[in-house]
Image (cartoon, rainbow, N blue to C red):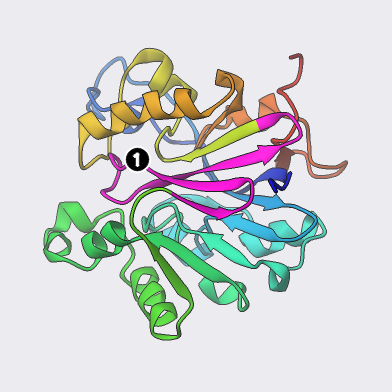
Amino acid sequence: MTEVYDLYAIRYATNANRRRGENFMPFPTDDPHDRPMPIDFYVWVAKSDKRTILIDSGADANACAARNNKFLRCPSEGLKLLGIDPNDISDVVTTHLHWDHAGNFEKFPKARFHVQRREVAHATGPCMGNAYMRRPYDVEYVCAMLRASFGGRVAFHDGDEELAPGLGLRLVGGHTPGLQIATVATRRGQVVVASDALHFFANKQQGIPFAILVDVADYMAGWQTLDALAESPDHIIPGHDPAVLAAYPVAKPGLEGVAVRLDTMPKGK
């Protein structure tokens, strides 16, 4: 039977100095009409009566500092603020292996990690010999995935699968060859955690892709997949938009700017 999950977004890093030209494909960073467009970095956690599943595991302070982003807290500490013990995480969905989504594996010692086969093939294959192609990846994080695989803790998926009752994986690609999204059954219906299939609400609203892609057509086709899977536009959660924190209710008092509930409708809806 389908399980119903509490669903949260936890912010672990931010960059207030990000520019619009870095978030939309056609705009070069020196465009005279460019303007600030801050970016946030999240992980997501789905908790039912039977299991607790983390969607992405974020990055650490060193990885954020190396890329001029402000590190706020380890995602494992964010979980603790919600009353969730990182040791209770049964599964981690790695939506893709970019540096900001695939770190901190050591913080979840009892978890099994879920990744698409083609994502690992890309992140360990010939493309990583190209400086531009490997730029969004962190070699230490990719090696951590391989170490987890050697330890028998990685499940390799080949397309769409149901990870647990009420929580599904869907391969969309585009941003990376093996980008997967998660569908989560909640009290308000099926919510789609888009991760980097949709970085900002504005990418889809304006029809302008994000600046870092391996396949533009797949990325834009992914928006149609999001629409088909979600019960409404309000059921789609982008991967990096600060508007998520503003739109959804705080997870609990004292966690303003840290964590919000995604299993309820946006404020005012």
Q: Where is residue 40 shown, x and y percent of the image?
A: 53, 40
Per the image, the residue denoted by label 1 is 172
Q: Residue furthest bottom?
A: 151
Does the magenta segment cover residue 177?
yes
The residue lying toward the viewer, choosing from 152 and 237, is 152
SS at circle 1 = loop
What type is the residue that disc 1 sits on? Val
137 is higher (above) or lower (below) than 28: below
Q: Is 19 situated left or right of 229 in this image?
A: left
Q: Is 178 situated left or right of 202 in this image?
A: left
Tell me what residue is drawn at x 31 percent, y 14 percent: 33
Q: Where is residue 215 shown, x and y percent of the image?
A: 20, 37
Q: Is 16 situated left or right of 67 in this image?
A: right
Quarter in which the C terminus is drawn? top right
The residues colored magenta run: 161-189
Does the magenta segment cover residue 157?
no
Q: Residue furthest right?
A: 253
265 is higher (above) or lower (below) than 185: above
Tell me what residue is drawn at x 45 percent, y 82 percent: 152
Q: Is residue 127 among the parts visible in the rendering?
A: yes
Q: Where is residue 29 shown, x and y percent of the image?
A: 26, 30
**Number of disc labels:** 1
Q: Quadrant of residue 87?
A: bottom right
- Mark 1 is surrounded, within 10 Å at the Cα level, by few (under 14), some (14 to 19) or many (20 or more) other residues, namely many
